Structures are given as C-alpha cells and as structure tokens.
Amino acid sequence: MIGAGIATSANGGEMPVKLAPGEHAALVQSRCSTCHSLDYIVMNSIFLSRTAWEGEVRKMVKIMGAPVPDSEVASIVDYLAQNYGAK
Amino acid sequence: MKDGAESMLNRRSFIRTVTGGIALATTGWIGRARADLPQGTLESALRDSLPGKQPLIKRSFRPPNYESPVDVFNDVITPNDRFFVRWHLSNIPRIDAGSWRLAVGGDGAERAVELTLEQLKRDFEPVELVAVCQCAGNRRGLSDPHVPGVEWGSGAMGNARWKGVRLKDILARAELKKEAVEIAFSGSDRGPLDATPAFAKSIPAWKALDDNTVVAYEMNGAPLPHWNGFPARIVVPGWAATYWMKQVSSIRALSQPLASFWMNTAYRIPKGKFPIIDRFTSQESDTSTPITEILVNSLITNIADGARFPAGQPMAVQGVAWDGGYGIGDVEVSIDEGRSWQSAVLGENYGRYSFRTWEYRFSPQSARRMTVMARASNVRGTSQPSELIFNAPGYHNNVVQRIAVDIV
C-alpha cells in the first residue's frame, strides 16, 4: 500500500508512517525503511536544504551501509527536497 | 499543572494517533513541544508506551527514541518507567540474565576475564550514586537554526540512583596495564544490515579509573529496564550519555585510541567553542574533540509556555539544575527580560552528579505578558549562556530558557 512504509520490528507497536505522495515516494519508502522507521524523515522537516538532504542520504549509504545505488540516490534526494525540504 | 489540563493530557496519552501538529503546537500538550521545534517534529510526535514504560513522547519508532514529558522532572528522581529511551540501531535483543557474559580484556590488560551477572553482584563491592543521564543531543530540536538528527525537546535526560561495580575494580581483575590509553565498550544492538557499524565507544583510561565510573546493574533499586540497558550498562557521571553503553557485552583496555565512526566522526564538538574542562585528548583532531562533560543547565518544570497566573497572588517557578559534576552554585530567575536576576532557593543536594531542585517564589502585581528566565551557574562560576552556542551536530544546548506566561 503506497504510504504505508511498514516494516516489522522487535520493538513492537511501530505504526505506519505515511509519507507524502509524489514521484519516487515508493522508492523512498522501500529503501529507507530497511533500517529505521520513516518518521526520521518527517521529524527532520521542513528545514533542510536540498544539499543537506543529499548529505543525509549519502551518510546513510557511505557510513550506515545502505545498499542504494548512485542512480537511486538522486531520485531519493529529489523526493526529500521536494516534499520535506525547505522552500 | 491545572486539573483541566491534566485530564486532557491523560485522555490524549491513550490515543495512539498521529494528529496534525498545529493544534498540539499551540496548546503545547505534547510534552510542552514548543513552537520552535521543527514543524515536522511536532507532526510526527505522539504519546506512546513502549512495553514497561508509561506514555513518553515518541520521536522515532525504530530504533526507539522516546523522551520524557517535562512534567516528569517535577520529581527529582526520574522513575524507571518514565525514563527516556534512546537507541541508534534497531535490532535490540532481549538479553537473558543467566546467559549474559561480560568479556573484559584487550591489549591494554594482562588477563582476559569473563563475568556473569551473578559474579558482578557477588564478587565486587557494590557502589551507588545518583547521576543525570543526558543525551548529547538533548534539546537539539530547539536549535536555531534547526539541524538534522533526532529532534529532541528537553526530555532526553533522566536522574537515577545507579548501583553497580566500579569499572576500576573490574579493570583491576583484568590487570590493567600502565600503557592502556582508552577503555572501549561494546553493546549488543545491531543494525539490520551487516554493513552498519556496531555502536562502540571508548573513554580515556583516567576517566575509566574514576571512582564514580560504574558498571551499573540497578536503576532506582530495580534491575535496569530492557529499554535502558538490561542487564548492565556503563555509567559515566558528568559525561554525555553516549558513553553510557547499554547492554554492555565487552570492556576492552586499549593501548591505541579506538578507531570507530562513533568516535572519529560522530559525537564530536568544535574545539575551543565550549567551556569544558575534561578533554578526551587521545581522540582530538586539529579542529574537533569528542563531547565529554555535560554543560551547566537548568529546566523550568512546573510551568508551561502560555500558562496564566492571577495578578497579586503568590506563585512559584520550580525546576531542576545540573552540570558535569562540579556542582550547582546558584540558579537565578529573571522576570524582566534579563535586566535583573534573583536567586532561587536550592533544594536538597543528592550529590554533585544529580539534578538539584530549585524554587523561586514571588507575587506578580500587574497584569501583563511576562517572560520567565532561569539561569544556572556551577561552583566554578560557569553559567548558562544567553545565546545558544550553535554547532552543526546540535550538541550542548544549554542556552538560558525562556517561558512566556500571562499575568491576568
């Protein structure tokens, strides 16, 4: 279901975090919910520039080991900047 | 808190829904989430109970990051079931006390030793102390400008009685070598991906040998809650909670500084910007240094932004103050935008690492909007700054607090 972003967790009780509909929403939901709930994205809005969002995504890949190919990074950053970025 | 407000709070605390942030922001019911938290933070916050916990303010589900509502700190000791919860990684095992082992060793020790929980409790002298556990990023959400990270309000902290074994006694069992420079800790949580670096921290050997640095197995007279590190955690009084490794599984004495993302990149502050005394010199670079001691700070606990008080009637401003363990010297309150300050009365002293309660009583005479400010100083004479010491990671937010109330 678009917008659900649910992943199971040993903590129990995680509720689906509904992300804004938009191009690449499904990609963001899929890639970003592997390791953490999507409220991390909502919580960090709406004050980050595109550059800052790109920094966060690159940190996830480079440091946290998120298996996101370069081709997808641009789409993810586009979505975050457009839907959760500073205007 | 007034009766009507409290019953409304209780009703909301049993409603697990994500509601629009606007109403909550203006009424401030979500733990006094001020309008200066990011809008998205207000929208994604809700009251939620982790198993064994009272409703806390959820910042993230997975991994769990939950803070205490400010009214919790009206009690100087934070109860276990209202103590904040903070994790980096989402695979947090439930540890069986009987099969848990603490591995002690490393190239900075002569011997490798393995201890059970039973041995920890039986074979070492127990010590107990009261200490504030505060996340390095507490109040990050109130940074101006906003910075990315976990957008905490003021509740990523707690004050508890910790009982356990002196780390120095455990290191003595492993025969710590003179050349050990750091003591490193590993926990038990992991990310879902093998590639995610496991959380690891080290402290200087001299800090590890401090009499107050403890491997704690009890919190407020009870076993540690699962979410606060059962069966045992590191307690480094006066230092930021990043070092307070939960579910500690190994203690390694090192002859070389620990090389880890969690030391070399994360949890660092710009050099020379903060009035710190204790420095982690083996981990310093040209420009940055690891966060160490907590900076002097205070929190108003009995009044919310927008509260109303009758003119000509006595009222009290109450709160807590704390620092990195030098001890609170004074807490001053201003009700005239900082033009003049009066000392509050300090409460009982539970030790230099504990919250210190304070109270300021006065009778506001004229109807007006009034700004209440609180400023703590420690016995060294270091005070909270009137301007935020901004830093990109959002650490050390100890700027003087301001609350607007209406005298009617």
Image (cartoon, rainbow, N blue to C red):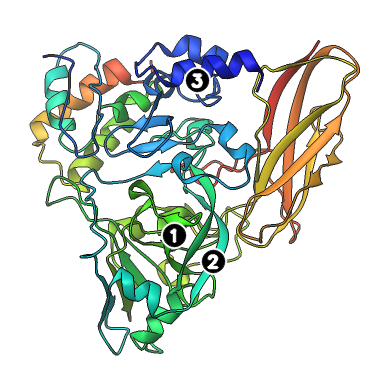
* Contact flag, marks 2 and 1 (Cβ < 8 Å): yes
Foreground pick, B227 / B336: B227
- Estimate how packed mark 1 is, as few (under 14), some (14 to 19) or many (20 or more) residues with alpha carbons within 10 Å: many
In the depicted structure, whether residue B117 falls above or below residue A45: below
- Of marks 1 and 3, which one's residue comes earlier in the chain? 3
Q: Which residue is tagged 1?
A: B218
Where residue B127 sits in the image (x, y, percent)? Answer: 52, 71
Q: Residue type at mark 2?
A: Glu
Q: Is residue B234 left or right of residue B193?
A: right
SS under mark 1:
strand
- Of marks 2 and 3, which one's residue comes earlier in the chain? 3
Q: Residue sitting at 35 percent across and 16 percent down?
A: B18
Quarter occupied by the C terminus of chain B: top right
Q: Residue sitting at 30 percent across and 26 percent down?
A: A39
Q: Chain of mark 3?
A: B
Q: Residue type at mark 3?
A: Asn
- Badges 2 and 1, same chain: yes
